[in-house]
Amino acid sequence: MISPPMSLLAELTHRCPLRCPYCSNPLSLEQKSSELSTEDWCRVLDEAAELGVLQVHFSGGEPMARPDLPALVRHAVSKGLYTNLITSGVLLNEQNLAELSAAGLDHVQLSFQDATPDGAELIGGLKDAQNRKLAAAQIIVADGIPLTLNFVIHRLNVMRIPQMFDLAEQLGARRVEIAHTQYYGWGLKNRGALLPSKEQLQQSERDVAAARERFGSRLAIDFVTPDYYADEPKPCMGGWGERFLNITPSGRVLPCHAAESIPNISFPNVREDSLKNIWENSEIFQLFRGTSWMPEPCRSCDRRDVDKGGCRCQALALTGRADVADPVCHRSSHRHLIDEAIAEAASHDETFIYRQMSGLPS
Amino acid sequence: MQTVSETDIPAFMRGTRLQHDRVRDQWFVQAPEKAFLADPIAAAILQRVNGESTLGNIIDALSEAYAAPRDIIAGDVVRMVQDLAERQVLTWK
């Protein structure tokens, strides 16, 4: 019996005014001409609600680059889906936020690249982005839609976590995410410049603990650590094909946003098949579902149901194989790759390449 | 923790709600970035949180519906509503 998905990440577009060097979109970005139509997305939302999805996260790229976003939110709301907007805020104004609010939008997650304008401009690569984000936060809070601030953490901003909490308090956010960069795709390309030291990670843990003490239940805090300094891997997406599905701008359906890196497999598309059939029967969703695919040391490990063998895409990106233990695990024969990456980052300078539509510079 | 009286009126905060999931035939609390399962007792209480009923009204309705002693129901309701107010699911009108 395959349990239904809880959560859908709807990547409406890969277009974005920002160029963050850790973007979770794939290295090969999809063009506007390949994006799903409004009608396609409405049908997908119908199918998602029917299948058992409870929350839909409208993301991108920058989802506000799609003029049909309010219509999609309204449609999702009419199907009983909880609607979350994941946005950079740089395209947000009073008028379009009012439209989204009237459509029934439940929550906004607003990204900040740093607590300071200079830091934010350096990472996002967009002039005056911080002012636009501050204005967006004020508009959202004035409307009353609950607001989460999201900060992606790396070596260039890890020292300013206390200021990030100050900003969240000043702006009236209900939640804050302090999420260390995950090193896949663009993040992996820029790992040398972005990976913090162990001491910096430990300081970030103390900063978050101090904020939890200070704010109590007034401010909900989510903290995501970089797993490079852990001995045990994290369970990928709460289990491959167990809770989560991702749909790319062109309609590809994936078990996680990095899964397109897996070679020699075809990716199902909502233009060609139903979401239910894709979730239950497609090759990609069955590939690492459960524990029967596992090799040693996972197969006989007493943590196999806890960490699910770790992240498949991290295993692939670092070892060249998606079906081996996550190299973060201290039982993995590839753990040395993680330790070498940590050593390499320690002597790497802080230059990085920005995300760009045309792929990597040669 | 704030002390409450039976004349206080609990309500869902904006961005949170109780929802019946037809597919799983279970009640969920939908909240920012997460949905969590409401057990049958929580669901029974939260179905009566409408932004108009006082805590006292809710306790009366539940003790009648479940033919249970009012003081026991009252304890459960106050504990749970206070806990969910702490967790920013409910607020007071």
Image: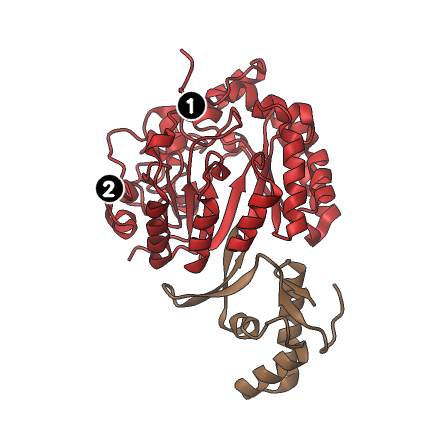
* Residue A88 percent location from the top left of the image: 56, 35
- From the image, tell me which residue sits under label 2: A283
Q: Label 1: chain?
A: A
Against A4, residue A210 (above or below) is above
* Residue A101 percent location from the top left of the image: 56, 52
- From the image, tell me which residue sits under label 1: A357
The red-tinted chain is A
| Residue A4 visible | no
* Residue B23 percent location from the top left of the image: 36, 63
Q: How many residues crowd mark 1 within 10 Å: few (<14), some (14–19), many (20+)? A: some
Residue ID at (27%, 51%): A280
Against A296, residue A77 (above or below) is below
What quarter of the picture does the C terminus of chain A occupy?
Answer: top left
Residue ID at (50%, 32%): A182
Residue A179, quarter of the rendered image: top right
Give the SS element for disc 1.
loop
Residue ID at (27%, 47%): A278
